[in-house]
Amino acid sequence: MSVPGTPLPYVVTFGETMALMRADRPGPLAHASSLSLSIGGSESNVAIGLHRLGIPAAWCGRVGDDSLGVLVEREIRAEGVDARVTVDPAAPTGLMIKESRTSSVQRVTYYRNGSAGSRLTPQDIDENLIAGAGLLHLSGITAALSPGCQDTLRHAVAVARTAGTLVSFDFNYRGNLWDRDTAGEFYRDILVQADIVFAGDDEAAIAVGAGSSPADLADKIAAYGPRQVVIKLGGEGAVALIDGERFHQAAVPIHALDTVGAGDAFVAGYLAELVLGRRPGERLETAGRTGAFACLVPGDWEGFPRRHELGILDAQESVIR
């Protein structure tokens, strides 16, 4: 995907990014005296993670004509991502709220029904941008938002397939957005058109039925056509079937503070190394490290590493000078 001496291919993604509010310390949200304001969205998280690792990335999305929409666009642009934003005057920017009920358990509440992001249309996505990209990355969250979003995702895949752009798809199942049967049917439709697939083991079962092991689930997904299948296993690492070869990546041992966004960081790490032409083992190792970094600070993407920071997790000294 890359040629020495030439500019790196860029990655395109799109979906809903929302404003994110969270309490500054654990406890019931009703008693929080202050809230922090940020943003979060699976696809923009991946775009930010890619850019921090040195890969050009573009994100397309729709926000409301409100201050939260300004925040979303400003934050993504500030991270160096090429943000292609449509402002919708008829719908608000979505909002999610994180409540740290205890120091180890979080509750995430979404206010996204009828949001601007759920009104994404094929006209919001630049076909030439996709056709010129090295890779298009998509998430099942987008498809779950509305029939219009499903149409937009299918259209983008068709454009990518015609142009020869690689298609990456992360299941990212959200049970509060659609049921497992509906999601499974959609996943199977996309699998036959995807080159790279990411899924948790439970998510994979939604599409292909129960498996005897994560490796078995990878086999079942690969039977639909994807040449690269990665089953994310959280604290147990990941297994993958890449061009017919099996891999296992152990998780990096850490004390997790906030696991939201770890899957997106993992995907960003894998795709970054893929764009650079790295071998499967290197892709998975970087993915494991970026996923670990995401868990070390509050927030969906703020802890994502830059490339020169990847070795910090191996540091023997607590102070780096």
Image: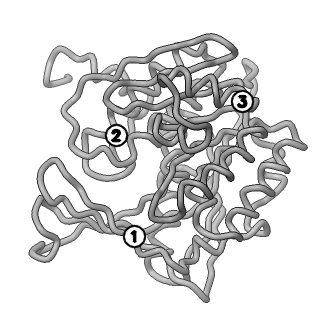
Q: Earlier in the sequence, mark 1 or mark 2?
A: 1
Q: Which residue is mark 2?
A: 294
Relative to the observer, which residue lies in front, 186 or 152? 186
- Give the class, few, some or many, for how many residues have Cα within 10 Å of label 3's Cα (few <14, many ≥20): many
- Colour scheme of the picture: one colour
Amino acid type for the residue under numbered disc 1: Tyr
Amino acid type for the residue under numbered disc 2: Ala
What is the CA distance from the residue labelled 1 to the residue labelled 2? 21 Å
- Give the class, few, some or many, for how many residues have Cα within 10 Å of label 1's Cα (few <14, many ≥20): few
Task: Name the residue at the top extreme.
Answer: 245
Q: Which numbered dot is residue 41?
A: none
Q: Which residue is mark 1?
A: 110
| Relative height, residue 34 to residue 169 (above, below) | below
Residue 268 % position (x, y): 52, 37
Element under label 2? helix
Residue 151 % position (x, y): 76, 64
What is the CA distance from the residue labelled 2 to the residue labelled 3? 27 Å
**Which image quadrant for residue 118?**
bottom right
- Give the class, few, some or many, for how many residues have Cα within 10 Å of label 2's Cα (few <14, many ≥20): many
Q: Which residue is mark 3?
A: 226
